[in-house]
Amino acid sequence: MKKIKSIIATILAVIMATAVFAGCSPKDDSSNKAKDNSPKETASVKKEKLTLWLPPIGENDAPIWKSILKKFEDENNCKVDLQIIPWDNYPEKYASAIAANKGPDVGYMYAEMFPQFIKMGAVEDLTPYLTDKDYKNYIYINDAKMLGGIYGLPIEAANPAVLYYNKDILAELGEQVPKTWEDFRRIAKKATKDTDGDGKIDQYGFAQGWGRKMFGDLNWNWYGFLWQAGGELYNKDLKSVRFNDKAGLEAAQFLYDLKFKDKVLPANAMSQTNKEMLQSTFGPGKAAFCIWLSSGASEILDKSFPNLHYGFITSLKNKSMGTFASVDDLTLMSAAKNKKLAFKLMTYMLSAESMTKFHAYHPRAPISKDEPYQGDPRLKDIIEKDKGIYRPLVVAPHGVEVYDYLWKQLQRMMAGEVTPKEALDEAARFANKLLSE
């Protein structure tokens, strides 16, 4: 029986071979030989692709990131598709891409974004991936603990909002660096004047911008003042907001009065962002004060206005002190096909070797204990001693919607359309309705 099966198998093999060769003309055979002599795609392993989304952390990030990622690509036989996503409409870009299953493998998110995407199941809890060494080495890892898990690894931190002051203007006015709201308001009023005698104001007390479409300028225009007034954004249970309480109203009224009563803001305050104010008004020496990221000192003022004599402080004091400092994270997206490789990319980007290269290009404080300090030397003491004065946001449900609506209401307030109380009460009504659902 075995012999018969063997004979049948042999016959079938001959028939199949004959059929194959019968279907090949000499031209086909020649073509096959040519293919045999060319490199075969199956001879090498196809490179795996990872998509990485980052915002512009600094100016022109792509070249430095690509040089850093090259080593990872070579060592892991993969291709990293780096995409720099503009800040404007950043959360919307993620939401639409994830809904279409076209999001990244590794992303970058800030605190306000997380609740929405955690609820969607779009980001991975990193707890199973982390080691004891990670917990000890990453300086800001406790800030990544949110909503029952660890959904990111901090990549951008300790870049607080600071109040810039013009040393020459303060000296001309006979004033010292302000410490309190009262100091600040007095100096801002004295600094707002016509300096060339043409009858028009050409020097301002406070170069503050309210024109940004995205709510990101709450970082400089609202959070610090709210905290300095003794207020908070949410109640402890995160089920309702409290930014419209007595402290919140005091902060809003203070900002409102600076514009409408003291008239210390430039006429174009409603059309410019704070960054633009730093570049167009404070940098050229036309304002006593401006508020923006501390990194603006080395990246904008020192480069573009080398003759400007300025300094900065982290916070004024009213009832308390406080200023905003984001802790933004790299995230492992749940749709990543190779989560192990994607997480490896995250830890590679956050390694001392990678971040040392990146921070040499964009000076920042280290995000891990094994990374050397390469940030602005003027900030070293502030970062080490003022921790607690600068702080990130609490991760709370519906963050994007709540902050976006709050920003729009505060803009209406600063445009003179509503009172401070009306602006805060309307924003709170909207927020509490969302939080109660």
Image (cartoon, grey):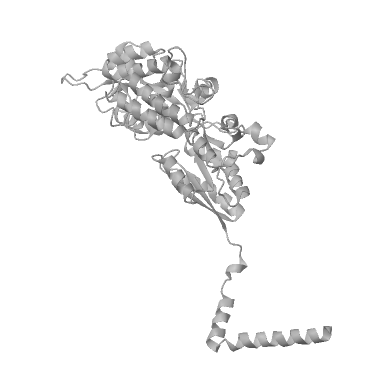
Q: Is residue 302 visible from the viewing direction of this image?
A: no
Q: Is residue 269 left or right of residue 376?
A: left
Query: Which of these two is toward me, 155 or 216?
Result: 216
| Residue farthest to the front, as pictured | 437
Q: Position of residue 230 (x, y in %)?
A: 46, 15
Q: Is residue 404 visible from the viewing direction of this image?
A: yes
Query: Which of these two is toward me, 188 or 53?
Result: 53
| Residue farthest to the left, as pictured | 198
Is 42 placed above or below 145 here?
below
Query: Which of these two is toward me, 209 or 215?
Result: 215
Q: Position of residue 199 (x, y in %)?
A: 16, 19
Quarter of the image containing the N terminus?
A: bottom right
Report the residue at 44% width, 27% height from top: 432
Report the residue at 34% width, 16% height from top: 253
Quadrant in the picture for residue 316: top left
Q: Is residue 257 left or right of residue 402?
A: left
Q: Position of residue 346 (x, y in %)?
A: 57, 43
Is 68 placed above or below 258 here?
below
Q: Position of residue 338 (x, y in %)?
A: 60, 51
Is 223 placed above or below 146 here?
above
Q: Is residue 250 left or right of residue 11?
A: left
Q: Give the number of callouts.
A: 0
